[in-house]
Image: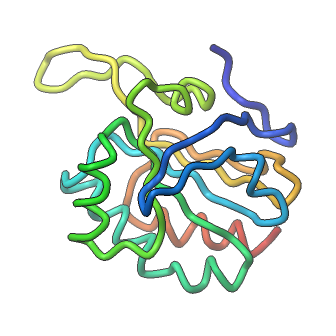
Amino acid sequence: MSAPELNKPAPDCEVQATSDRSFKLSDLKGKKFVLYFYPRDSTPGCTTEGRDFSAVYDQFQKSNCEIFGVSRDSMQKHENFKAKQDFPFELISDPDETLCNLFDVIHEKKLYGKVHMGIVRSTFVIDEKGVLKQEYRKVKVKGHAEEVLEFVKSL
């Protein structure tokens, strides 16, 4: 599957999220939103990334922007992770990799010398019209949430 293109409509599909939410991404038109894809709940990097987005969540809200974390974890794992970390935003469960494939974030990775297919930490910013305005691939967690916030404020 090909990667989404900047300044073109973002891919759309129906998603399942925490707090018993189910919606199409296109339902979010009228608001900016951030999709940040991460490998797995309750791991050090993913926990730090979620906490960093939580720390600046109010500023995203002031910019009319929602945040959604996305991984292949189950809804139950997401609910537990969200509650334990007190995340103010929803987490999207993508066990069949539909959303991951639409945004081309599943790639070959190496862990302890073994090769496997997994989510490459990536973030996408979609504007109020549903257009992909920015993408960050192979994200390093430190400072990332603030970098995304600065971009959102510039829209």
Which residue occupies the extreme front position in the image? 20
Where does the image place residue 6, in percent across and percent down from the top left?
80, 39
Q: Quadrant of residue 67?
A: bottom right
**Image quarter (top left, top right, bottom left or bottom right) of the C terminus:** bottom right
- The colour mode here is rainbow
Which residue occupies the extreme left position in the image? 112
The residue that appears at 32% across and 40% down in the rendered structure is 39
Eyeballing the image, is 122 above or below 51? Answer: above
90 vs 60, left or right, is left
Q: Quadrant of residue 115?
A: top left
Eyeballing the image, is 104 above or below 126? Answer: above
The number of discs equals: 0
The residue that appears at 74% across and 57% down in the rendered structure is 28
**Image quarter (top left, top right, bottom left or bottom right) of the N terminus:** top right
Where does the image place residue 113, in percent across and percent down from the top left?
13, 18
Q: Choose between 29 and 57: the one closer to the eye.
A: 29
The residue that appears at 33% across and 18% down in the rendered structure is 117
Where does the image place residue 139, in percent across and percent down from the top left?
45, 47
Q: Choose between 31 and 120: the one closer to the eye.
A: 31
92 vs 8, left or right, is left
Where does the image place residue 48, in percent across and percent down from the top left?
29, 64
